[in-house]
Image (tube, rainbow, N blue to C red):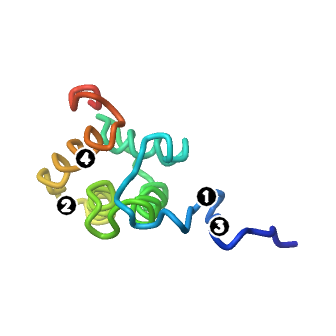
C-alpha cells in the first residue's frame, strides 16, 4: 500500500524532501531533519560515522536542499565516503570548508564547538 504524498513534499527513506526548497542554498538549522543534523554533526566530530550508507544519506539531503554539487556539507560527505571506501587520506581543505559552512549555516557559533 503506498502513501499519498503532495507534489511539493515527498519522502525518501523517511527523510522529507521539500521540492519547493531544493537547491536553494538557503538552509536554516531548523530546516534540517534531526537524523540529518545528527549525521552532519557526526561528520564534524572526532569520531565520524563509518557506515558509508549513512554518510551518503546525509550527502543526498544536502545535495537536494543545499547548493547541489557545490554544497560544502555534500562535498565533505562524499569525500568522507571516498575515504571510507578506499582508505585513502581525505582532503583536509574540504573538511575545513565544511566546518566553516556549518558555522555559516548556523549549526554552531564557533568552529571549535564542532570538535
Lower position in the chain sequence, tag 1 or tag 3: 3
- Kindly report the distance in space between the C-alpha atoms of the residues bearing marks 3 and 4: 26 Å
Residue at mark 2: 88
- Kindly report the distance in space between the C-alpha atoms of the residues bearing marks 2 and 3: 36 Å
Q: In the image, which is nearer the foreground, mark 1 or mark 2?
A: 1
Neighbourhood count class around disc 1 (C-alpha, 10 Å): few under 14, some 14–19, many 20 upward: few
Residue at mark 1: 16
Neighbourhood count class around disc 3 (C-alpha, 10 Å): few under 14, some 14–19, many 20 upward: some
Furthest residue to the right? 1
The image's mark for residue 101 is 4
Of the 4 image quadrants, the one containing the N terminus is bottom right
In this rendering, the count of numbered labels is 4
Lower position in the chain sequence, tag 4 or tag 1: 1
Helix or strand or loop: what does disc 1 sit on?
Answer: strand
Q: Residue 22 in the image: x percent, y percent?
A: 46, 66
Q: Residue 11 in the image: x percent, y percent?
A: 64, 64
* Disc 1 + disc 2, Cβ < 8 Å: no
Residue at mark 3: 10
Amino acid at each position: 500500500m503506498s502513501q499519498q504524498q503532495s507534489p511539493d513534499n515527498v519522502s525518501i527513506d523517511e527523510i522529507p524532501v521539500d521540492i519547493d526548497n531544493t537547491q536553494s542554498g538557503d538552509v536554516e538549522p531548523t530546516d534540517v531533519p534531526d537524523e540529518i543534523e545528527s549525521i552532519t554533526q557526526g561528520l564534524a566530530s572526532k569520531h565520524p560515522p563509518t557506515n558509508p550508507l549513512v554518510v551518503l544519506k546525509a550527502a543526498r539531503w544536502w545535495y537536494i536542499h543545499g547548493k547541489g554539487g557545490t554544497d560544502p556539507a555534500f562535498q565533505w560527505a562524499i569525500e568522507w565516503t571516498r575515504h571510507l571506501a578506499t582508505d585513502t587520506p581525505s582532503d583536509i581543505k574540504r573538511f575545513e570548508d565544511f566546518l566553516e559552512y556549518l558555522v555559516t549555516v548556523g549549526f554552531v557559533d564557533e568552529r571549535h564547538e564542532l570538535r
